[in-house]
């Protein structure tokens, strides 16, 4: 119902950037290779995301707005091995309960597409329409019916910069996909598909010497096989060690000469999911201890890959927090790997 959806919206939809995050993840889950995002007034007035993913058949287009009607979880066991980015089935109903939303979608299986229009959680219109394969979702007037939430929004410029940072993160994590971000007045990001992360890094940051340039970054690619046996207290809890266990780290860390005064240049992804994780930030701080001054931060792009059951993404619906099953192992591997690479990179 509407109240439950608005309460969930309080968790999932903090600001325009959280809407963009949910919609982006849905597009990626739908196998999109091209994603175009358009925003007006920092996303308050308009957020539109168009993808060329697999789209939805009409029944699914309506089901998408039912709470917990995710198409991505079949059994409760799936909760332990989530490979898609979304799984809660909460985002679309939540967003639709606090905005005016139009969904236009066509599945490749269907001859025609579906348009669904919803305002404040009420379905206003469902129609067939000739549409290309894929999905376009338009969100207008975010929080129009929840003035208390609207008041918490920051300036248009601030909200826009959050959106731009977020889209940049996803573009970095998915170099082989085409991303575009436009505001009413300018193209903020146009990143055509490239073969790999290094090319993407150069595509996005290469011209900006205050950010990281490839020649000043050391490249990482380490795999540690065989995650250790869990400690005895963990064995009592329902826990099966992964077989074979692995933890892989790839990415780039800046050499000591390149530093920043804030953490905004630290990008960490776990199984391609953007995370803000205190444990990893701590490991990085340790790795750079006595290498750069304690008042500055490195520039880091880190991709961690591990078996899905090794990481709990279910901690918070906004999903930038994660919990590692073997947090000490992950922490120490990140610290040791980055430290080793930095020592080698020292003149
Ligand atoms: P979740 O992603 O957790 O499953 P959402 O509320 O984000 O839940 O989306 C609900 C459902 O709508 C998804 O499970 C999916 O089936 C469908 N859906 C949403 N966005 C798209 C999209 N861009 N392309 C195809 N299907 C989509
Ligand atoms: Mg989703």
Image (cartoon, grey):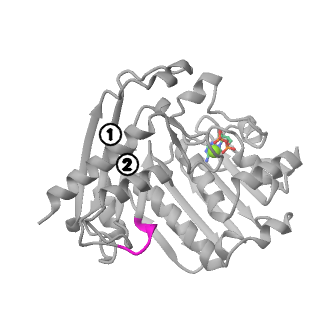
Residue at left offset 43%, top offset 25%: 230
The quadrant holding residue 226 is top left
Q: In which quarter of the image is the C terminus?
A: bottom left
Whether residue 195 appears in this view of the structure is no
Q: Residue at x 46, y 32 (%)?
A: 310
Q: Where is residue 196 in the image (x, y as percent from the top left)?
A: 30, 52
Q: Is residue 261 magenta?
A: yes
Residue occupying image coordinates x 81% and y 48%: 5
Secondary structure at badge 2 equals strand
Q: Name the residue under label 2.
A: 303
Task: Please tell me how crowded label 2 is: few (under 14), some (14-19), or many (20+) other residues with Cα within 10 Å.
Answer: many
Front residue of 97 and 301: 301
Q: Tell me if residue 312 comes above or below residue 235 in the rendering.
A: below
On the question of residue 146 being in view, the answer is yes
At which x and y percent is residue 299? 34, 65
Q: Is residue 340 magenta?
A: no
Q: Earlier in the sequence, mark 2 or mark 1?
A: 1
Range drawn in magenta: 260-265
Do the CB atoms of the residues marked 2 and 1 lie less than 8 Å apart? Answer: yes
Q: Where is residue 279 in the image (x, y as percent from the top left)?
A: 46, 50
Give the alpha-carbon distance from disc 2 to disc 1, as whole Å.
8 Å
The disc at residue 248 is 1
How many numbered circles does the render carry?
2
In the image: residue 201, left or right of residue 112: left
């Amino acid at each position: 119902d509407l109240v439950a959806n608005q309460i969930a919206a309080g968790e999932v939809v903090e600001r325009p950037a959280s809407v963009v995050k949910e919609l982006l993840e849905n597009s990626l889950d739908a196998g999109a290779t091209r994603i175009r995002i358009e925003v007006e007034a920092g996303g308050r007035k308009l957020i539109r995301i168009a993808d060329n993913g697999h789209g939805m058949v009409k029944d699914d287009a309506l089901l998408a707005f039912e709470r917990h009607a995710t198409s991505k979880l079949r059994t409760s066991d799936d909760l332990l091995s989530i490979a898609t980015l979304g799984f809660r089935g909460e985002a679309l109903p939540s967003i639709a309960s606090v905005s005016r939303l139009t969904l236009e979608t066509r599945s490749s299986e269907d001859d025609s597409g579906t348009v669904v229009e919803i305002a404040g959680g009420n379905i206003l219109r469902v129609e067939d329409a000739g549409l290309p394969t894929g999905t376009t979702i338009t969100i207008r007037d975010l929080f129009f019916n929840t003035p208390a939430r609207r008041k918490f929004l920051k300036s248009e410029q601030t909200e826009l910069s959050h959106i731009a940072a977020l889209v940049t993160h996803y573009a970095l994590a998915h170099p082989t996909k085409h991303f575009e971000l436009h505001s009413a007045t300018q193209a903020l990001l146009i990143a055509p598909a490239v073969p790999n992360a290094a090319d993407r890094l150069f595509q996005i940051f290469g011209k900006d010497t205050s950010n990281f340039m490839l020649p000043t970054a050391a490249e990482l690619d380490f795999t540690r096989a065989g995650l250790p046996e869990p400690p005895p207290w963990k064995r009592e809890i329902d826990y099966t060690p992964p077989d074979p266990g692995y933890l892989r780290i790839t990415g780039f860390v800046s050499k000591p000469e390149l530093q920043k005064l804030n953490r905004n240049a630290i990008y960490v992804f776990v199984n391609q999911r953007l995370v803000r994780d205190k444990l990893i930030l701590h490991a990085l701080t340790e790795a750079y201890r006595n290498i750069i001054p304690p008042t500055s931060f490195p520039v880091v792009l880190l991709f961690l890959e591990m078996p899905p059951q090794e990481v709990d993404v279910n901690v918070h619906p906004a999903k930038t927090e994660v919990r590692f099953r073997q947090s000490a192992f992950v922490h120490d591997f990140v610290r040791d790997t980055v430290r080793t690479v930095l020592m080698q990179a020292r003149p």
